[in-house]
Amino acid sequence: MTGTKHKSYARFIVLALLLAGSTAFAEETLKLAVGQRGNWDTSVPELGQRAGIFKKRGLNLELVYTQGGGETQQAVISGSVDIGIAAGAAGVIGAYVKGAPIRVLGSETTGSGEYWYVLAASPIKRFADTTGKTVAYSTNGSSTHSIALQFVKQTGAKPRLTATGGTAATYTQVMSGQIDVGWSSPPFGLDAIEQGKIRIIARGNDIPSIKNQTVRFDIVNADVLEKRKEAISQFMQAYRETLDWMYSSPQALATYAEFAKVSEAQAKRVRDEFFTKDMLNPDRIDGLETTLAEAYAGKFIPAPMTKEQLAGMIRIQPPIK
Amino acid sequence: MANRPLAEAKCLPAALGLGGLAAVLALTEMLIRLGWVNRFIVPLPSEVFVSFERIILEENVLSRFLATAGEALAAAFLVSLTGVALGAFLHRHRLLRRACESWVAGLAAAPLVLLYPLFLVIFGRNALTIVMIGFVSGLPPAILKTVEGFAGTPKVLLDVGRSFSLSPSQLFWKIAFPSALPVIFVGVRLGLMFSLINIVGVEFLINFGGLGQLVNELAERYDLAAMYAAICFVILVSVFFFIASEKLERWLLRSA
């Protein structure tokens, strides 16, 4: 009788171990390179992971953060990560055309959350007042460069456009009076706005063509897409579900505020004022003609891209249940 | 003449160096073509070679080269002048040297490039900021090696000088300085390397002129071959300064 009881216990323990083991083994790990840590738009994997949304889809994400699109893209191309979040559209197109093993999983941002600002005491009220002044963008050929050029075209102002690097470097140059108009991406600069140190004079989304243009992509290594298609599909589905949660749950704001080290009020402001849900819809890729024209003009691609090339590059994974 | 050692032949070392470089490039080309090295991370050397024309004609690489070389030259001048003077000063004042030496060594290891916002505020958005970051970065090795060079002067040489009743100034210029010169130049060369790394780094970070900005732009465009070609120009700046410092060292040793 005792022996039977022991056997039952043993069977129970083995079964429990097997179940635990199967759960552990069922989780597939994906490595991600994510640009610009702390930005709302790039926080989808981080927040989804914290909320357990990716886990429900059997995924464990290993996240590494990069300084921007170029680094993210290089990590995906080299295969050191599987997926890249927020790679600049023109850069991705340029790399794909040159034969790099990357594919587009979806849009990361359509439109622009970036804004242009001046010192609070500046006489500049809007972009049209910038004639003869210095206006910042990050690097030549970047999305901020494209937006600044569009501002010039739209307003007829004749500023001196100046490449100033990232948000922190630009902020320093504006605050020390070396650049008249800086650029930034929230939440960077929100503190200064609230403290009345700087003032927004224009937003990327003020330009209709930019508002409807996909400026950053989520990308995947081509080999990974081919060999781990199911995991990638599950990732994109979890990505969509995370977005739904980010725009519906107050808990998402609290999680983001903790992650990005901002107040919940600032988190709400970033979400509601700078990034509408539609802007982050991964299934919406718009304004490709403009992006392709800019990529060609900015020497990202040596010749205009064909429709066949485009079809091969964009691999949006259909929604799954 | 026929028995002259190979190492002393005038052109052989240069030819061997160039031959070695060509062999490494050929090997790299072969490894990439065989697929053993990822061509999307390391471009084919032949593609890099071809892209030189493109970056010269389309990217104004020569004017950028001159901008970076000019900044490096200014920083090198400041590093040499200030570093050697401070090193000599510290050598003469033992207490000060003991108080400061470890701080200077600590400064050498500090990632000064990260202080670029401070330099931007002080010097403005211009080449002076880049020169000053290069100068401050290059200073510690020049100071430390100068101290080391003077400290290594054999006492017997100084004693001989004193026995000839040389003045302190003569002792310095005729004995201590020539004796320390090779080590001082090691420090100056190290300083130049530190300076150049920081100069290109800041150009990259703040997108201001020079080769660093070009490397940044080409990387963003995923134009790897052209980016490597631009990096070759950075190496060229380094080689140029290395050769110039060697010639200067020889000239000074002859003059002394």
Image: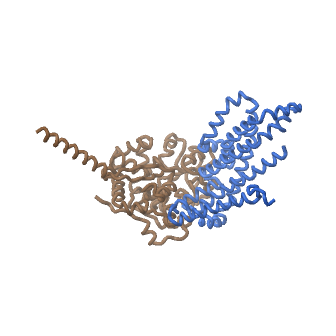
Chain colours: A brown, B blue
Residue found 84% across the figure and 34% down from its top: B171
x, y percent for residue A29: 37, 52
Q: Residue furthest left?
A: A1
Residue B170 figure quarter: top right
**Residue B221 visible in this rendered orientation of the protein:** no
Residue found 38% across the figure and 47% down from its top: A47
**Residue B98 visible in this rendered orientation of the protein:** yes
* Residue B53 position (above or below residue A69): below
Residue B55 figure quarter: bottom right
Lateral position of residue B105 relative to residue A199, left or right: right
x, y percent for residue B15: 71, 61
Q: How many marks?
A: 0
Front residue of A264 and A242 = A242
Front residue of B54 and A1 = A1
x, y percent for residue A221: 43, 60
Q: Quadrant of the C terminus of chain A?
A: bottom left
* Residue B206 position (above or below residue B115): below
Front residue of B15 and A75 = B15
Lateral position of residue A239 relative to residue B245, left or right: left
x, y percent for residue A224: 40, 60
